[in-house]
Image (cartoon, helix red, strand yellow):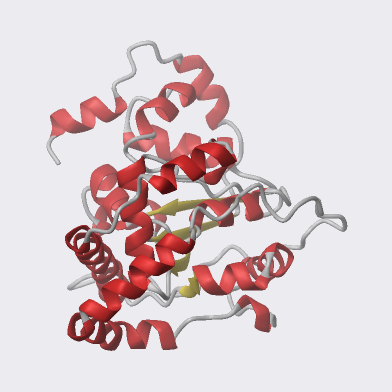
């Protein structure tokens, strides 16, 4: 990404330098974690669950290039360095800062994982994907086709109307499967290149475990003590956008493309086999304030 693009992302002519200096006087977070994810894998649900305790940070999409310019203005940041420092202080909760990022986010905002690790080389890594990638692709296709991304944004009637406009298209489903596979490969290559061993989660397993179990599981792995009383209102404000039509389309695609689905399943099998399960509980092994994996040794370093 060229310098002009960086200027566009962080252009902030009305930035209040004094306000930024005041924000940067706050202590940095003691614990930093990153949730690497692919779209439609439950990241919004996870953000809501982890944010409610006020002890596990507020891990939103801090580096989504669609959101960065607006956030930078709110932080009075005018460069990537200022932005990273400021957002960690603004969004930390109880000394913990978490964020979610796709491989596309990393490329757009940092240019490369090498640059990303100059800022977050000691972050504790989590990797969130979806076990049923065909259903995930159908969900992405539906989001793009009907322009609805989260159930919290629309009424029940609007969801029904959007679903009625959703029509089967095998080429579009395959397009999104290809997109998701490329994203998974890019993130897996990053972990392999940097010798990092993330905690591995899936949409299916975190939603099956439920909010309370997921909070406790993250707290163990981050070395954080949850407050005595975590809010126990409704699990989350999210409802599934998935309908019978999603399942029908996924089943139809599998039936029509058995060889492709078999090849994808075989490639992903090691990733699925390595998944952790929050329902199993148990203490984590990451010490407080330190990343679970070792940093990559650079050539000659």
Depth check: give the residue in front, 7 or 182: 182
Q: Is residue 95 left or right of residue 244?
A: right
| Residue 281 percent across, percent down from the top left | 69, 80
Q: Position of 83 compared to 229: left or right?
A: left
Q: Quadrant of residue 103?
A: bottom left
Question: Is residue 177 visible in this depiction of the protein?
Answer: yes
- Going 38% across and 64% down the picture, which residue do you hit? 136
Q: At which x and y percent is residue 42?
A: 50, 59
In the displayed image of the protein, which residue is found farthest to the right? Answer: 228
- The structure residue drawn at horizontal position 57% and vertical position 23%, both measured from the top left corner, is 22
Q: Is residue 194 visible?
A: no
Quarter of the image that includes the N terminus: top left
Q: Is residue 12 left or right of residue 198?
A: left
Q: Position of residue 190 (x, y in %)?
A: 28, 68
Residue 194 or residue 278, whichever sits in front: 278
> Quadrant of the image for the C terminus?
bottom left
From this view, report whether residue 185 is shown above or below residue 102.
Answer: below
**From this viewpoint, which residue is outermost toward the front?**
164
Residue at the image position 48 percent from the left and 34 percent from the top: 86
In this rendering, the answer to whether 177 lies above or below 96 is below
Q: Quadrant of residue 14?
A: top left
Where is residue 71 shown, x and y percent of the image?
44, 29
Which residue appears at 33% of the width and 35% of the height?
66
Horizontal side of residue 221 vs 39, given as left or right: right
Residue 252 vs residue 58, the one in the foreground: 252
Q: Image height check: is 291 above or below 155? A: below
Q: Quadrant for residue 129, please give it.
A: bottom left
Q: Is residue 172 above or below residue 63?
A: below
Numbered disc total: 0
């Amino acid at each position: 990404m060229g310098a002009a693009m960086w200027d566009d992302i962080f252009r902030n002519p009305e930035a209040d330098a004094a306000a930024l200096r005041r924000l940067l006087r706050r202590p940095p977070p003691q614990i930093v974690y990153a949730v690497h994810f692919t779209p439609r894998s439950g990241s919004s649900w996870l953000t809501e669950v982890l944010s409610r305790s006020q002890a596990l940070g507020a891990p939103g999409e801090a580096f989504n290039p669609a959101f960065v310019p607006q956030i930078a203005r709110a932080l009075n940041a005018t460069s990537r360095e200022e932005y990273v420092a400021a957002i960690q202080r603004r969004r930390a909760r109880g000394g913990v800062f978490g964020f979610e990022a796709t491989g596309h986010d990393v490329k757009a905002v940092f240019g490369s994982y090498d640059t990303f690790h100059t800022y977050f080389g000691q972050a504790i890594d989590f990797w969130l994907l979806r076990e049923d990638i065909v259903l995930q692709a159908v969900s992405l296709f539906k989001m793009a086709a009907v322009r609805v991304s989260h159930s919290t944004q629309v009424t029940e009637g609007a969801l029904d109307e959007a679903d009625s406009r959703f029509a089967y298209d095998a080429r579009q489903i395959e397009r999104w499967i290809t997109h998701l596979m490329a994203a998974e490969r890019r993130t897996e290559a990053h972990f392999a290149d940097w010798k990092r061993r993330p905690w591995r989660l899936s949409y299916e397993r975190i939603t099956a475990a439920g909010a309370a179990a997921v909070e406790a599981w993250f707290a163990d792995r981050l070395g954080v003590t949850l407050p005595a009383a975590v809010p126990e209102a409704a699990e989350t404000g999210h409802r599934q956008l998935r309908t019978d039509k999603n399942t029908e389309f996924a089943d139809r695609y599998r039936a029509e493309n058995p060889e492709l689905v078999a090849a994808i399943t075989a490639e992903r099998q090691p990733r699925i086999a390595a998944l952790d399960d929050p329902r199993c509980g148990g203490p984590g092994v990451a010490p407080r304030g330190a990343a679970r994996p070792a940093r990559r040794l650079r050539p000659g370093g």
